[in-house]
Amino acid sequence: MDRRDFFRRGIGKATEVAVKSVDKRVADRAKHWIRPPYAIAEFEFLLACTRCNACIDACPHHVIFPLAARLGADVANTPALDLLKTGCHLCEDWPCVNACETKALVRSEDESVEKFANAEINESLCLPFSGPECGACVYACPVENALVLEHEKPVINQEICVGCALCREACVVEVKAINITSNNAQKSIVN
């Protein structure tokens, strides 16, 4: 190996390590917010998103909002979902995705909805776990078999649930018995 190849390989390896480090840091921070459906991996998303607000303006249910500047200049004004107040309606024509010209939001080829958040039932708050029947969340779920009743108690199938939070929106108790968390930290451009 000559000197030029030695430095070329060394620089390539250093670049790979740096990219992995930045990607991990960015993905770890991203667990604090939920990106719109079909968002690419967070590191790539931040590079692609121009903060044009097209996806925010296109959302007919006003679920997408810009992240605050206090979270950092790198994420300020990028779109996120407010799934604690209202659910994503999984619009048939995906206006938010279609509005994204930079491909920070890219619909998959197989037409299936990609998981973008995690939903979990808090059994200590859920009515059916303490006696009375309910089922409001089950009837609100738009994804077939993602949320079902087993022995009159709601059960979320994590393999099918995409995290739209319509179940949380339909929940009749306050504090809501369904927790929604980000799926962003699991998306990474490098393994």
Image (spheres, helix red, strand yellow):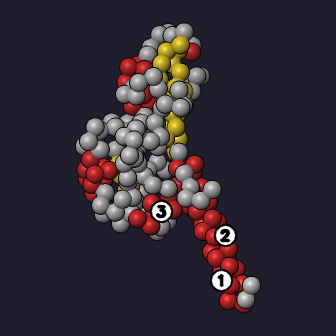
Q: Which residue is mark 2?
A: 17
> Residue 63 is drawn in which quadrant?
top left
SS at mark 2 in the image:
helix
Contact (CB < 8 A) between labels 3 and 1?
no
Q: Earlier in the sequence, mark 3 or mark 1?
A: 1
Residue 35 lies left or right of residue 189; in this view the side is: left
Q: Amino acid at mark 3?
A: Glu
* 69 or 185: nearer the viewer: 185
**Label ID, residue 44:** 3
Q: Amino acid at mark 1?
A: Arg
Q: Position of residue 72 (x, y in %)?
A: 49, 65
Callout in the foreground (2, 1): 1
> Residue at point 60% right, 68% down?
19
Q: How many neighbours does mark 2 have within 10 angstroms: few (below 14), some (14-19), or many (20 or more)?
A: few
Q: Amino acid at mark 2?
A: Val
Q: Which residue is mark 1?
A: 8
